[in-house]
């Protein structure tokens, strides 16, 4: 009853049972849990409405890090279009998934806080240095004699260095309130 399988010679056609093919090609489809996200930027928008898959072991955690990277946000908040921004959405720093779980098919409203641009503070510093330098040059046309007597720097003291020191000192005091306490001042 058993047929011996011999290699096919050019031009021969092999017969295949239709029943055996159908049983071998079983497809199991599982639905990936998704939530619909309405994304706002500082309460304005929505800037995006999209579906996001849920991840994690139980497939119920939002992929927060992906949203932060894609839209250039530094933090995400729960959001209600009527009342505004709510609590921050916390996420695990290792895997980027939310700490709270979400329901499959749910609608989530999120408000994002954009990352700070470096252009604005750098421009302010440069304009401040230029203004202070111009003011020092206008007020004192010659180098004061007491600076010449001290001769700390071994030559002429450019006023823009003083302007830079003043601005850097003021910026560090504003950025970190306990900056001087940290070093014992």
Image (cartoon, rainbow, N blue to C red):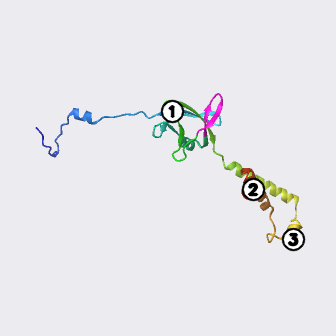
The image shows residue 68 at horizontal and vertical percentages of 57, 42
Instruction: Judge whether residue 77 is colored magenta.
Output: yes
The image shows residue 32 at horizontal and vertical percentages of 44, 35
Q: Which residue was labeled with disc 2?
A: 180
| Res 113 quadrant in image | top right
Q: Give the residue at x 74% y 55%.
A: 181
Near-viewer residue (81 or 182):
182
Tags 2 and 3 touching, CB below 8 Å: no
The image shows residue 136 at horizontal and vertical percentages of 84, 58
Near-viewer residue (179 or 34):
179
Near-viewer residue (34 or 9):
34
Q: Which residue was labeled with disc 1?
A: 35
Q: Secondary structure at mark 3?
A: helix
Residue at the extreme top? 82
Instruction: Judge whether residue 22 is colored magenta.
Output: no
Q: Which residue was labeled with disc 3?
A: 149
Q: CA distance from mark 1 to mark 2?
A: 48 Å
The image shows residue 52 at horizontal and vertical percentages of 50, 36
Crowding at label 1, few (<14), some or many (≥20) Cα neighbours within 10 Å? many
């Amino acid at each position: 009853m058993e047929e011996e399988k011999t290699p096919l010679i050019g031009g021969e056609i092999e017969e295949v049972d239709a029943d055996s093919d159908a049983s071998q090609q079983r497809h199991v489809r599982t639905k990936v849990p998704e939530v619909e996200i309405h994304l706002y930027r500082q309460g304005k928008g929505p800037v995006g409405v999209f579906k996001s898959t849920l991840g994690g072991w139980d497939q119920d955690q939002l992929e927060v890090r992906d949203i932060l990277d894609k839209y250039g946000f530094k933090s995400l908040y729960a959001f209600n279009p009527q009342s505004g921004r709510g609590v921050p959405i916390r996420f695990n720093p290792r895997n980027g998934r939310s700490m709270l779980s979400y329901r499959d098919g749910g609608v989530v409203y999120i408000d994002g806080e954009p990352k700070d641009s470096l252009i604005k503070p750098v421009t302010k510093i440069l304009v401040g240095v230029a203004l202070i330098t111009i003011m020092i040059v206008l007020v004192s046309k010659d180098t004061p004699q007491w600076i010449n007597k001290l001769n700390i720097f071994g030559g002429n003291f450019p006023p823009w260095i003083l302007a830079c020191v003043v601005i850097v000192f003021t910026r560090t005091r504003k950025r970190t309130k306990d900056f001087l306490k940290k070093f014992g001042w």
